């Protein structure tokens, strides 16, 4: 999965390595102040009671020559489920809200950089 994805994108952007974003990157602070990559569980983990503690969330990016993000990947974090299950009673509101906050930060960063 992830290794193949990384390799394919490395072929597309051969001069731009993947970097792990640190919590101080502007994408985390452009509107909402977020402390780096966040773990947003998928609905499978909530309904299935699957263990989730061993998975650390990470954000990886490919930057252009000026340091702007061209590709951003959320790893071990399911923002889509946070958005999709906002109104599902079993899905915790705190994760849905965090998914929206990250999405808004990503959108504003993309529009202003």
Image (cartoon, grey):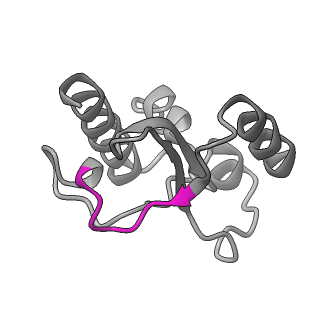
**x and y percentages locating residue 97 in the rendered image:** 30, 44
Q: Residue at x 53, y 32 (%)?
A: 80
The stretch of residues the image draws in magenta is 19-26
Horizontal side of 19 relative to 33 (left or right) equals: right
Q: Residue furthest left?
A: 31
84 or 8: which is nearer to us?
8
**x and y percentages locating residue 96 in the rendered image:** 38, 42
12 or 40: which is nearer to us?
12
**Quadrant into which the N terminus falls:** top right
Instruction: Residue 34: name its quadrant.
Output: bottom left
Q: Residue furthest top?
A: 111
Q: Main secondary structure of the magenta part?
A: loop
**x and y percentages locating residue 45 in the rendered image:** 68, 54
For residue 20: magenta?
yes
Q: Residue at x 73, y 41 (%)?
A: 10
In this rendering, the answer to whether 66 lies above or below 37 is above
């Amino acid at each position: 999965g992830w290794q193949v994805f990384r390799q394919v994108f490395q072929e597309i952007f051969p001069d731009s390595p993947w970097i792990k974003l640190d919590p101080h990157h502007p994408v985390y602070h452009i509107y909402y102040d977020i402390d780096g990559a966040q773990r947003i569980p998928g609905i499978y983990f909530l309904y299935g009671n699957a263990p989730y503690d061993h998975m650390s969330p990470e954000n990886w990016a490919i930057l252009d020559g000026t340091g702007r993000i061209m590709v951003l990947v959320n790893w071990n974090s399911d923002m889509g489920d946070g958005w999709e299950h906002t109104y599902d009673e079993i899905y915790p509101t705190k994760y849905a809200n965090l998914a929206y906050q990250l999405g808004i930060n990503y959108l504003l960063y993309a529009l202003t950089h």
